[in-house]
Structure formats: C-alpha cells, structure tokens
Image (cartoon, helix red, strand yellow):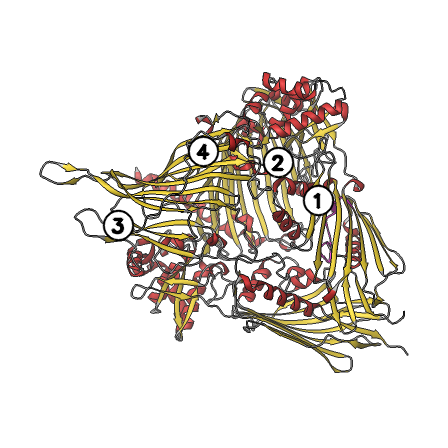
Amino acid sequence: MRTFLLLLFLPFCGAAQVMAQSEGLRYLTLSDSLREGANSVVLSVEEEYTATSRNTAVLHRRRAITLLNGKAKAEKVLTEFYNDDSKITTFEMTVFDAAGNETYRARKKDLSDQRYDDDISFLQDMWIKSVKAPCDGYPCTIVTEVEKEVKDFAAVTSFPHWIPVGREQSLLSGRLRVNVPVDNELLFEGKHVADPTVTDDGKVRTYAWELTNIPAQPEEALAPSYSETLPYVRTELADFEMEGYAGSYRSWQSFGAFMNQLLEGRAELPPILTAAVHEAVDGVTDEAEKIDRLYRLLQERCRYVSIQLGIGGWQPFSAAYVEENRFGDCKALSNFMGAMLKEVGIASYPVLIMWDEKPYYSVHSGFASSAFNHMVLYIPSQDMYLECTSKYAPTGYLGEGKQDRNVLWVTPEGGQLVRTPALKPGENGHLRTTSLTFTEHNNLDFSMAATYYGAAQETFRQLGAYRGDRQDQLDWLHHNDFLPDVTGSNYEFAVSTEKPEVSLAYQTVLRDKVASMGSRKFVTLNPFPISWIPEQTTSRSLPIDYSKCRFYVDTVRLTLPPEMEIESGLMSEPLVYSQTVGEYRADMHLEDNEVVWTRTLKLQPARLEPEAYAEFRQFFVDVAKAENLRLVLRERRTK
Amino acid sequence: MRQLILLPVWLVSFTLTAQDVPEVVFGKVSDEDRRLTEVPGDPTAEAYVLYDRQSLDFGYSDAEGPSLIETFHQRIKLLRPSSFDRADVVLRYNRAYEQISNVEAYLHPAGGGTIAVRPEQIVDEVEEDDERVVKFTFPRVSEGTIIEYRYTRRGKNILIPTPFVFQQDIPVRWAQYDAMIPPYYGYVSLGTGALDVNEVKITKRAWGPRWTTGAYRTDQDKIEHSDILWAKRDLPAFRSQPYSNNASDYLPKIQLQLQSVQYPNRPKQTIFGDWQETVDELQARQDFGRYYRNKINYSKVWKAFEPDLAGLQSDREKVVAAYRFVTQSIGWTGRYYFLATDSPNKIFDNRAGNSADLNIVLLSLLNEAGIEAHPLLVSLRNTGAPIEQYPLLDQFNHLMVYTELDGNPFFLDAGDADRPPGLPRERALNHRGWIADKDNPRWVTIDVPSSRQVTMVEMNVGADGRATGKIQGRLENYFAFAGRSTLSEATTEREKPVVRDIMAAFPEATVDSFTVLEGKSDQAEQFNYEAQLTVPAAQVLDDYLYLQTVILPLLEGDLADADQRSFPIDFPYPWEHRYIASVHLPEGYHLEEAPAPVRLKAEDGSIVATFSSQETVPGLISVALTVQLGRTLYAAHEYDALRDMFRRIIEMQEAPLVLKRQTK
C-alpha cells in the first residue's frame, strides 16, 4: 500500500519539478519590449480574493518575478501584514538561478515575524511576516505564494487595491479574481486595465481582470502617483460588516453614515470637562473667540498618542477616555474637540483626509473608498478646519499636505465629499532682508531679519516647540541652510501664537563669501541661493506633477569698501524668468556705495505635459544661475 | 578620559563619606519640585531628571545559581511640551535570559496629587521571538508634571550588569548607582569622570548558597558584602558635536564586568582575568573558535571554495581568493556582532550572516588553506573607544580577520563584494582592535592605506562660459569602493561617481558620457573612469569671463559647525586628492589675472595643500591642486587651525581665473 501511494505521488512530484524549472527559465522567452527599461519582470501574478460573507474573506496571491539586475532590491523581500483579525495560512518563497535551478526554498526558521512599527503608533496590533530571497546573481527568479484568512476590520480594509506592476518593471501576465456572494456586490474602478469579465454560478459572482505584456514604465522625478499611470484596480465590498457595525460603500453618503455609527455615543463630556469648557468660554459672545479658546484648551490639555488596535483604527476613543488620560490619536482628539464645541452649541464635522504631500490615490466623487489616513475637524459656521493633533498650530491652520484634495465630511446626514482649499503662493513663503558689510580680512558683517509664513513656517514652528535650547536651534537652522553658521549673535526666534508666522533675526561674520585675488575681490552676493534643479533627462514620458506653492522675497544690501568699485556683475535691468510653475524677478541697483539686490520668486503647483519638461527644467536652471551671482570688485579707479 | 577601577570587593579599598544623599521615597515628591518651572542654570531645558537611580543586587537559587537583580528608578520633571514623548516609556528585554517585573508608574501634577498608571495600562508584548517590550504611557501629562517609574530587571547572567550613564541629553539633578555585591564575586569597573559621592563600605547580610559545614547541617551565615554608592549631582545636558567619534565616551558612566569568582574554601576562578584567559575562553566557544577550527563546521563551504585555489601560489592570491569567495557567495544581514550565529556550513547554506558569521567563514577557509589568520575584535566607531587595560568583552561589537602579508598586517572584513580586501568597513575604523590569537592575544593599530582621488581634466572654454571637456580619473581604496557603490546604485548618468559631485556644484552641467575603464579597473582597489561633460564653469560679465578651473570640489564643508570644540575631530581614514586641469581659453580672450600659487602645510605636516596655475603656452592654462590629509585624529584644541586650513583650501578651489575680451 505504501509503495502504491509513493508511486502515485511520484509523477506529480516530477511534474511539479518540471513546472518549477520551467518557471525559473521563463524569463528566457521575454521579448525585448518587456526587457527595455526593466529592472525586474513580473512573469505572472495571480491574486484571488474570496469574500465568504460581509465580514470574512480569503486572500490568495501567487507571484513569479524575475530580477534582471540588483536594482529591484525591494522585490527580493516577501512581506505580509496580519493582526488578530487575520491569519496567514500559506507563506512560501522559492528562488531559481539563471540556469533555472532551484537555489532556495524558504524554511520556517528563515521567516522573520515582527510586530510592525510605523514609527507613529505607540500601541498597534499589526504584525509583519517577511522573508528575503538570496539571489547570488542575475537573472534571479522568485516565486512567492501567500494565503490569508481575514475577518472584520482586516477583511473590510484589505479588499484589493491591485497594482500588479511597478515602475521600471514589466509584466508578462496578471490576473485578479474577486469572488463575492450574489447577495452582495463588488464595487470597482480601474485605470489602464480593461473591464472585468463577470460570471455568476448562482451563489458566487466572480469578477476577473486580465493583463498581459505591459512594458516597463520609467521611474521619473515629479511623476504622478503609481495609481494614476500604471494599471490599477480598486475594489470595495458594497455592503460590509465590522464587529457588528453594518456599513456600505455604495456612496460617500453611506460610508459617512457608517462612520457616524462608529462615532456614536463617544462625544459625552465628563462633568469636570463640561465645567472647564464653560469656564473657558462663558461670557464670550463671539463664536470665533469661543473656538479659539476651546482649541487652546485642547492644546493645553491633551497630547497626541497613537493607539491603533483593531476597529480602533477607525473608531475613536471617547471624549471621556481622552479627558481621563489627556491623550488620544487624531480621531480621539478630533472627537474630543467636536464634543467641546457641541457643548457650547457650535456644530462641527469630523473630516477624513489623506495627509500626504502627494496622495497615492486621488479620492473622487465617483467611487467611495477609504483612502484616508487622518482625521481633522471642520466647523461649517466659520468655514474652518482644525488640526487637533497639534499642540502649537494657530487656530484654524490646517497645514501643508492637507490642502487642495477631496476629503470626507462626516455630517449628521452622512458623508459629503468636499475639496479643501488650495494653498496660495502669497500666503506661504518668506520675507527676508540681509545686510552685508565689508570688514577687514575679506570678512563680511552679516545681519538678517526674516519672517516665514504659512507652509514655510511649519518646520520653524516645530523647531520652536521641540528645541528650546538656543544652541540646538542654531545647529538645526545652520544644518538646514537657514543660517550661515552657529557662532553669531543677536539671535532672535519668535513664533506667533495667533498667526502662522515665525520671525528670525541673526548676526554674524561671514568668512567664506569673499575671495581676494590681486586687485580684485569676488563676492557671493546671495547667502541663501535657491538652487534646486529638476533632474536632467534625455526623454520624459510621464507628466510633471509639481506641487510646491511658495512666494519668496529676498533683499540683500551689500555695503562696499570705500576703496573698491564694481568691475562687473551689476545688473543694468531686471532679470525676469517665467514659466507655468513660477515667476522670477531680480533687480539690482547701486545706492552710493551700497548694492541693493531684490528678488521675488513665486512657485505654484501645476500639472504639465511630458513635452514641457525641458522648458520646466530650464526655468530652474535660469533661476539657479541668477541666484548664485557673484560681484567682482576692483580697486576704485575713479573718484 | 576613562579610568579603570578594580573592585576586589572582599577587601574594602577606600571609603569616602556620603554627602547629602537625597532621601527619595517612590511616589512622594516635594512641593518645591512640583512648583519648579525651569532648570537652575538652564532655563530652556525641556525636561529635568530630578532623580535617576540604578541599583544592583544579586539573587541566588540552588537550582540556577546566582542571578542579577537590577532596579531602576527615574523621576523626571517635564517642563515643555517637546518633552512629552518622554512620558511614553518603552523597556525592551529578552525573555530567554531576563525578565522585567514590578513596573510601577506615578504621575505628580504640578498642582498637587498623585495619579498611578493602572496595571492594565502597562503592556508587556512580544516584538519578535524572545524579544519583548514593556510599554506604558503616562496619562494627563502637562507642563510641570513630574513622571516617576521604577521596575526590576532580573537576569540569569551575572557577567556584565547593565551599564549606568550619569549624564543625559537633559540636565540631571541627581544620578546614583548603588550595588550590593557578595564577597564571592570580584568585579572590575570602568568609570569615567569624578564622582560627587564615592562610598564603598562593608555590609553584612545573609545571602547565597548554603555551605555544608557538618554531616547534617548547612549554614547560611551573614556575609560581608561590598556596599557601593556612586553618585553625581547637577549634571548639565550632554551635547554631541559633528565630526566626533565615540562621543558617548565623554559621558560619565559605570560599566562592570565580572573578573573572578571565589566561593568559601574553593579555589579562586578568574573570569576573563586577562586577555590570555579571555582568548582561551573565546577559542573554546562553539560560536567563536570552534566554528573555524573544527573542520566539521566548515567542510561544506571549504569544498565549494577549494577549486578556487587551484593554481594560486602566493599567500596574497589565496587571501584575495578566499575574500572574494565569501563576499560574493554570502550576503551580510546588516547586523554586527563578535560571535557567530551559526556554523560556516550553515551560513554558507543560508547565503547570509552577521559580520562575525561572514568573517568566521573567511577565517575557516584561510586556516584550512594554510594561511595564518586570527579573529580581530573591534568596537565600532561611535560605540566607544577601545579599552585595552582590561578584557572587557562588552566593548566589542564586530569581528573581522587579521592576517599578515609580506610581514605586514592585512585586515579583512567580508561584507560587500565591492569593498577591496585590506579595507575594513568604514565603521570598523576605530583606531585599535584586539587580535584573538590563541597563542599571542594582542592589540593592533588599524591603519589603512590612504584613499586617493586623481582627476585629470582637459577643458575647452567657450565665450559663453561653458566648458566642454574630458575627465579621466582614478579612485583608490575607500574612494574606489564608494565609486563602485555609487555606480551600482546609479540609474542616470548624472548619478554616476564623480559626475554626481560635479553636478552638485554645477547643477546645470550636462553629462555626455561616462565610461568605466575596463582592464584598469579589474583590481578592486582601483576604479578608473572617463567622462565627457559640459559645465558652465565661467561667469560671463561684461567684458570679463571669471572661470572656475576646479570643477570637482575636493572639500565641501569647512568644519564651521561649532563655536568651540569639546571633543576631538576624528576622520575615518587618511586621504589625498589630486586635481590637474588643462584649460584652453576661448578665442578672443586673454588671461588678465590668475590666483597666485599657494602651498599650505599644517605645523605637523599632517595636512598639505598646494595650488598652482600657469599659462604654459598662450591660451593654455595648467592648473594643479593637491590636498593631503595624513592624520585622522585632531584634538579639540587643534580645531581652529584645522578649520582655518579647510577654509583656505576651499578658497583655493574656488579661486577663479580672470579672462578679458581682447580689444581689436
């Protein structure tokens, strides 16, 4: 009997061996178009997600990828997250060398199993299982397989957001299948991918997407996000359940209504807090003043501590919990602030938002999905957002990385998708005046006064809050090129509590800005040149997504030594450059023996076509050149 | 800097009177401390350690023998919101050999009262395998709050108790280390700095194993313990400085290591008593000596390597072959240690290991090939200067290989195939290392050859200020390694070695080509290249053209990051830059002025810089700039001179030629 079983198995083992070997060599069949510009090729990816109910599912993913060189380092690592709501049942990796020989098969002892640390959360119940492929040489083929059972929070949040191929990577074939019980529905949207085929066996409806022969897209600076330019499918289960809460993604309104359920009963104020709220605002009639006082009360009373456990990833701690502990995460603190406002009759909405310089996925009205990582508060009567995690932001200051994007107001009537205001260059930048005066030994007395405002003041405000020590501040400012050294005097650093403004003043002696040669002196006029230049490319294939929004005004006054005059470098007319993303203007004139240089630079967000790249880059080349101007002085020849 | 205190603790060596040791009761704070709003003498400090105590005691069980019992007690005044993260407490431990218990935490608001952190708010969770973490965060934290906590750490290993650092990044009012050491154990202590309280006395108490004194009875008499109290008061916040190495050495601290054990009526056993005993002990260990001395542990990897030796005659060839084999077939996990995690055979199977794993594989191959080689233990840069006076094992965190070629030391440090043999990792260049040679353990100075960069530029300058030209260059040793690493990461021409540095200085430059010169670059110690570039090297202003001839900056920063130095400046390795340019002037321009030749030499000759430019034939200028740094360690008092030297070198590299348009 034993012999029979063994014989029965042998052909299968042999077949598996052949299949594995052929997978290891499959890269040999790749066409040139799939090799061009690719560091790795996805030979095949098969992902299947099976929803077994409204709060349970099974995920299966098998992927074979060939690394063509050592640059696709991230592809060597297989990782999978899990928590109390999910269980990894399969986790396998096999590696083949260029000859198609199996060189590695992951064993249990090779697997790393670590608690996930996002560097933000103090407590979090997320784990990460991983293994790294040892590739001795290239091409190296890695085959991975993962299966995971999920429920509740893990099931709802892990519906596929499928992006089967990255940049500098090509794809031979890919398939996504999502199986959903017929009494439910799969909501989806796709980009750069054909519509799915949908089949139905009476119990389960299956949605299947197929992709073949996708050539590599280059990795380019200032490119739009992956989800915009690469094949992308985003899915959600229409009706879901999470720890007893029923929800729906059928509309933004319904998703907001679900969030309302999670928030329900969490705004009750304990008596001591009620008293504190009234002590702060009673007698004040102006609503803006009330808000300001309560926001200050929040900042004084609470601090940000992130605790994300299970449904706590979406459900805030109650106001009573925050009051007791005086800490909370963005949801808990927004809920707490909203509860205080409610106590004095001011309505507010929690707001779900993606806080990121460039959101990975652009939230839009046509598809409801939770693409958010943060919560703030909105007060409709004042048209004001409050960032409740900050202990030092001025009232009503939302902060960079949150503007000009769709966010979800969680109103009593449900969700409402709204766009946050865009930044305006004039409100974000600096106004700086620098005086330079020649002294002995080619030194320059340096004196600077600057005001930074809006988005440009945020790091300074953090500096003020987090580094009280003068020397620490000087070190940081010098290290980040806001000051020329750390050895100066008359340092002043003032953070406005009312407005998003920080002012800075400093004096020192510069020893490295003047080079002397024979009868000449060479002076670097602008101590703070803006020299960033986009990377140089011979061809550009992706649009340019420029997001900076600033207005910089600098004035430099250079007092010449009486015995010297300008040989060259004095501008006779203003220097002006202009492009969609910016406007530059520099002017220079001589007042007695003082050179006055004034420059304004406006930078504004824009989306440009790839063809505009050369012109876009040239603008910054011109700016950098103009910023790094040098004056040449010689001994005075005329009296 | 560091001083060694030997504690033959059964003999009281000295006794000083304790001065006003504060009586601190856990959970009770004074009204004065509650009212405190700033640190005396440091009004901007974000927080203030009011009390920091670490106590060492010993447990004993008949089943497991002695154990360490360390208690920790911290009391911190939080003065500014920026300090509130200090209220998030994270205590890591490994449950395989230690545990943390009796965690208690109290918060004392400025206005009065005391709040306990509830036991359920103190979380003890797994991070990975046996690595665990105790976490809690204090509720109701606000400016002026005092947080206070204590806990006990029990460890099975009494060899090295937890070091205690008196000074912190915030001011400390009182820091105390006390210990009650049974007479059976002799510890050596490495102390730094003077103590405000230094008291060692004898205290009797019952402790330890029961000794059979008759046929039917055992005794546990009160025995004389060394009762130690070391403390410092009013310590300012510690501030590190750039270009330093081992800054933590300047923190006053206590670091104990067991030196000997002598139970009553038993012979004295020394433990790591001297370097010879230490090497004997290490060589006897499976994860050290036995892995590379017993062939059973490396037979498989040897079998794979042996064919590479075919035809090789010299020791140098064999050493290089073994190094290449290890670096090319086994990856480094990124972890450092001085003990191996597995046998060379297993490490070879896994194709990955920590720094000791890789180098122990290398040792096994060298020894089997008949090359005498030994483990070389080092303390990595910034993890403490080497301590040679006493065999403190805890100082080591990396193992490499020492051998000799042609009678000269040769250091091998496997980890990266691009790094040439003879060059340890940069982090391992901490001046000295200990050779764990069974017959002759000894310290050695880790000297590495100077790293050189030679750049030859041929440039044609246009009337528009743009210079087109060819660069030919050679990088050697660490510069070659950096060049290869940069090349392997580069995705565009602009990111390639040397070119990247030129781009940083001239962002608007363009690269026409970059070629690695094969044949000349087959030795890892060298990296030869050729590049074609267009660089806007000159500023055109009116009738003048101001031309920067040094387009590859040899020095970037001018060391101007500190007002005054407290610590030495410590560069990892010596280096030399040579830059030679032939500059063809644009037609219609003549040289009006050129920088005068300069030769700078530091008093001790450790830095030499020369610059010259001359018009060899009309329209062709030759420029040469050379900078050599021969010494790597400069004392704090040498900072001003060094900074001045750097400034003057930067001036040299930025000095322009003045060209003027010829009038007809």
Label 1 sits on a secondary structure element that is loop
Left or right: where B73 falls relative to A326:
left
Q: Amino acid at mark 3?
A: Leu
Q: Amino acid at mark 1?
A: Pro
Q: In the drawing, what numbered circle is on residue B149?
A: 4
Can residue B197 be spotted in the picture?
yes
Can residue A530 be spotted in the picture?
no
Q: Residue at x 40, y 41 (%)?
A: B54
Q: In the drawing, what numbered circle is on residue A224?
A: 1
Who comes first in sequence, dot 4 or dot 3? 3
Looking at the magenta stretch, what is its main secondary structure?
A: loop
Q: Is residue B38 magenta?
A: no
Decide which of B416, B32 is in the foreground and name it. Answer: B32
Q: Residue at x 59, y 16 (%)?
A: A271
Q: In the drawing, what numbered circle is on residue B277?
A: none
Q: Residue at x 84, y 59 (%)?
A: A594
Rendering quarter of residue B615: bottom right
Q: What residue does disc 3 label?
A: B11
Tell me which segment is drawn in magenta.
Answer: A532-551
Image location (x, y in percent) of residue A527: 74, 56
Spatial CA distance of label 3 from label 1 is 74 Å
Rendered-image quadrant of the N terminus of chain B: bottom left
Please say if the residues under marks 4 and 1 sit with CB atoms less than 8 Å apart. Answer: no
Image location (x, y in percent) of residue A82: 50, 34
- Mark 4 or 2, which is nearer the eye? 4
Please say if the residues under marks 4 and 2 sit with CB atoms less than 8 Å apart. Answer: no
Left or right: where B472 falls relative to A26:
right
Q: Amino acid at mark 2?
A: His
For residue B342, above or below residue B486: above
- Mark 2 or 3, which is nearer the eye? 3
